[in-house]
Image (spheres, helix red, strand yellow):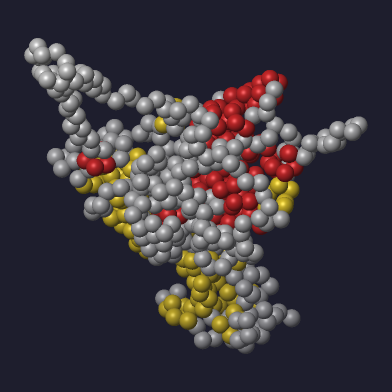
């Protein structure tokens, strides 16, 4: 990659030194605990943080990207004096097509609401968009943000890139044999299947639409509660997009450049990059191993009678052709040795709505002989739409690499507000075989105690209204019980919980008499305040009973008596 970086540096010793220092500083900022191989790819151990991705573990499948670096000039050059014209290279490079820039800013605003702890800057999306597609090929998009023609990465058939078999039947990339990265942010189809978002509100998730792709990229970077204001976490997120040190450094350089200032340019007029990560022009060629040497044939010897010597000549030896050794069989990958998945002592999965499950799903990859297999990707998927539960970070899919014992543990499940059972499925990435299904249960929020927040007597005159509203607080095992469902009924007696047909009552929106209230819920502090109560002409002592999910019950006494003179 050094050759690609070098082509973008300005001539002259001073500027070259500055550029070299900048690249070195960026290289030093890679995520801690991450090493690189000889090709500049990031490598991590089996115990690395779970990676909620498809394909080979990145958003792009480690596909091709642009290696052009930003100019050394500031995006906002200082005015020059005299007759020397101002430098405008920075302005040209800093321009981002209007629709593309709008998509980045809208994605930032959306993430600010949905994941405020991520602190995602739109400039990071712009940096990735520049490196992945040259800002959608210079902003060649229609008014809705969809590219005029698909932006496709190279075929991921293992020839210089990852080998990823088709996962979308060619729906997005037009290839039913292998996958290809698609769209302005270059998602591979298997990642788009779970990471895709509808960024423009048209009801579709289209990787070729810059609004959809930018929002998806933002959620992808922010998963697992990554905070982009923490450099190490930002680096880790960028590396999960394309697992290469050179890629990380290139994105960070454009991020810094855009942070210094940028502006919009008309769609279709953006500056286009010119160098790819797989472009070898100008780079040192890879040495080709010498071909097996063949003996040079001896010159022919004249036969008798041909004008040459009549003495017999030794018969020339025929050179033997070196035998081509048979290629050694390629050893199977760890994934190819997996025969089945085994449960790794997963406990019963139960949580109250809104809570994090205390138990985690764990599986083990094994060979046919029962031997554990390390370094295998296991995908955990929350199946169906019957639940709003997610994994930590808000995603419904998570991919984890098995450790040295062949074990993969899914991120913690977080229960939503929908109660009941749902399924989490564990499968081996890149292997067609039976998965394991786990049933998780979300129980309703509950309370075991109800108390009034005031001890004021509740009294009223016939035909009047009660001065005080009934307010109660719910707790569960001593803690606040928020969002707990409750009902309130004016009952006939302590022994007869049927609805009373006389005495105090509530009013509905139309002013009609109501003596049972349903669909009540405690607030964030566990407090429930009932509507105003009214009295008919019947005097006496009456009872209001409040019940919550979980069995908490409270009976409140109401008195209706004529006013004393």
Residue 283 in view (yes/no): yes
* Number of residue marks: 0
Q: In this view, does 100 lie above or below 465?
A: above
Regarding residue 391, the answer to whether it shows in the image is no
Of 451 and 375, nearer the camera is: 375
Against 253, residue 535 (above or below) is: below
In the image, 134: left or right of 486? right
Residue shown at 32% from the left, 23% from the top: 290
Q: Percent position (x, y) of residue 184?
A: 55, 52
Considering every residue shown, the one lying at the far right of the view is 82
| Residue 102 at x, y percent in the picture | 67, 55
Q: Which of 149 and 124 is in front in this view?
A: 149
Residue 163 on image: x %, y %: 35, 44
Vertical placement of residue 285 versus 524, above or below: above
Quadrant hosting residue 529: bottom right
Above or below: residue 381 compared with residue 307: below
The C terminus - image quarter: bottom right
Q: Residue at x 57, y 35 (%)?
A: 250
Q: Which residue lies furthest to the left in this view?
A: 312
The reply, left or right, for residue 153 in relation to residue 327 is right
Residue at (60%, 43%) from the top-left corner? 273
Along the line of sight, which residue is nearer the eye, 339 or 456? 339
Q: Look at 69% across and 40% down and name the residue there.
A: 259
Q: In this view, does 72 lie to the left or right of 446?
A: right
Camera-nearest residue between 460 and 545: 545
Residue 68 as seen in the image, left or right of residue 311: right
């Amino acid at each position: 990659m050094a050759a690609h970086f070098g082509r973008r540096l300005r001539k002259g010793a001073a500027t070259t030194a500055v550029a070299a220092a900048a690249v070195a500083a960026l290289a030093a900022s890679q995520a801690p605990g991450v090493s690189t191989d000889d090709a500049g790819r990031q490598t991590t151990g089996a115990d690395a943080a779970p990676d909620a991705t498809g394909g080979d573990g990145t958003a792009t499948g480690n596909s091709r990207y642009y290696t052009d670096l930003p100019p050394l000039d500031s995006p906002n050059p200082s005015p020059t004096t005299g007759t020397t014209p101002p430098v405008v290279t920075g302005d040209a490079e800093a321009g981002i097509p209007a629709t593309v820039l709008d998509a980045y800013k809208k994605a930032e605003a959306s993430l600010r609401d949905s994941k405020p702890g991520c602190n995602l800057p739109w400039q990071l999306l712009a940096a990735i968009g520049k490196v992945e597609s040259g800002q959608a090929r210079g902003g060649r998009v229609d008014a809705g943000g969809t590219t005029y023609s698909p932006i496709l990465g190279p075929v991921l058939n293992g020839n210089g890139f990852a080998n990823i078999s088709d996962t979308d039947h060619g729906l997005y990339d037009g290839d039913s044999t292998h996958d290809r990265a698609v769209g302005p942010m270059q998602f591979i189809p298997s990642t788009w299947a779970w990471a895709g978002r509808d960024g423009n509100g048209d009801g579709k998730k289209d990787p070729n639409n810059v609004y959809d792709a930018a929002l998806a990229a933002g959620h992808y970077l922010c998963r697992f509660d990554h905070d982009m204001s923490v450099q190490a976490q930002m680096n880790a997120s960028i590396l999960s997009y394309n697992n290469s040190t050179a890629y990380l450094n290139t994105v960070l350089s454009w991020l810094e450049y855009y942070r210094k200032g940028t502006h919009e340019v008309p769609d279709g007029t953006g500056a286009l990059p010119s160098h790819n990560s797989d472009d070898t022009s100008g780079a040192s060629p890879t040495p080709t191993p010498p071909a097996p040497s063949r003996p040079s044939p001896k010159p022919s010897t004249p036969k008798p009678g041909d004008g040459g010597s009549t003495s017999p000549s030794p018969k020339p030896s025929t050179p033997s052709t070196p035998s081509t050794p048979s290629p050694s069989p390629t050893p199977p990958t760890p994934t190819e040795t997996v025969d089945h998945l085994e449960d790794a002592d997963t406990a019963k999965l139960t949580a109250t709505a809104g809570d994090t499950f205390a138990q985690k799903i764990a599986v083990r990859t094994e060979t046919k002989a029962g031997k554990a297999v390390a370094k295998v990707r296991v995908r955990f998927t929350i199946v169906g739409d019957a639940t709003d539960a997610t994994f930590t970070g808000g995603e419904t899919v998570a991919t984890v690499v098995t450790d040295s014992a062949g074990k993969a543990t899914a991120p913690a499940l977080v229960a939503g507000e929908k109660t009941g059972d749902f399924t989490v499925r564990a499968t081996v990435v890149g292997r067609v075989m039976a998965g394991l299904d786990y049933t998780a249960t979300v129980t309703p929020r509950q309370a075991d105690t109800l108390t009034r927040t005031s001890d004021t007597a509740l009294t009223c005159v016939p035909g009047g209204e009660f001065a005080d509203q009934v307010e109660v607080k719910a707790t569960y095992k001593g803690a606040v019980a928020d969002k707990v469902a409750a009902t309130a009924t004016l009952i006939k007696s302590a022994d007869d919980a049927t609805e009373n047909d006389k005495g105090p009552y509530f009013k509905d929106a139309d002013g009609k008499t109501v003596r049972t209230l349903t669909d009540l819920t405690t607030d964030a502090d566990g407090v429930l305040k009932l509507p105003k109560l009214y009295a008919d002409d019947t005097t006496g002592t009456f009872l209001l009973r409040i019940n919550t999910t979980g069995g908490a019950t409270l009976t409140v006494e109401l008195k209706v008596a004529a006013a004393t003179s």
